[in-house]
Image (cartoon, grey):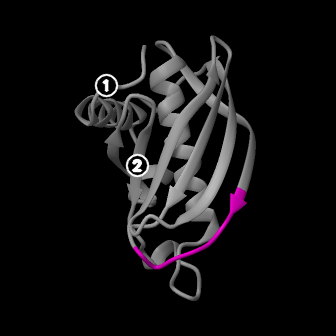
Amino acid sequence: MAHPSSLEEFSAFVEKFTAKRGFDDIAATLGLEPHAVTDSTVSMSMPLQDAYAQASGMFSAAALFGAADITGTFLAMQTYAGSGQFPLAVQSNINFMSNSKASPAIATARILRGGNTVAVAEVSVADADGKQLLHSTFTYAIKERAVGNK
């Protein structure tokens, strides 16, 4: 499979995966939704919600990390994983650069390198005003895995 060519294609892929999974997971908890697609990136948006905001009302580090990981995972899944394969994060490097109350946060992922068994993604997260909140890289092992309970 190749990099998604449009937001509609990426949205359909996420929807199909969610239905196959058969249960709500952290992506649903965080309210992540496909946001944009370019020729080299995909983006997902995450609204600021009380359930995962820090005490000051800004995004929690855990929520920002989750948005980055999930966006990178969906891109690696669609770009490099074939039928029955799932990218498993085996390494991550996260730099929290700032924080904000400007919702939504937008996680944007691009593949730095990929192949049949390993993919490396770079993911940045910015607030609604474009201020960079997080910069990260993820290394994913592409392995045969059963997905969901269906």
Q: Residue at x 42, y 16 (%)?
A: 2
Q: Residue at x 53, y 35 (%)?
A: 110
Amino acid of disc 2: Met
Residue 88 among those drawn in magenta: no
Image coordinates of residue 132 in percent, x first then y, are 55, 63
Q: Residues within 10 Å of mark 1 (few under 14, many from 20)?
A: some
Q: Is residue 5 above or below residue 63?
A: above
Amino acid of disc 1: Ser
Relative placement, left or right, of 57 versus 24 is right
- Most extreme residue toward the bottom is 56
Which residue range is magenta in the image? 95-102
Say the numbered circle drawn on residue 5.
Answer: 1
Q: Quadrant of the C terminus?
A: top left
In this figure, which residue is indicated by the disc labeled 2? Answer: 44
Image coordinates of residue 35 in percent, x first then y, are 33, 48
Image coordinates of residue 31 in percent, x first then y, are 38, 59
Q: Nearer the viewer, residue 144 or 118?
A: 118
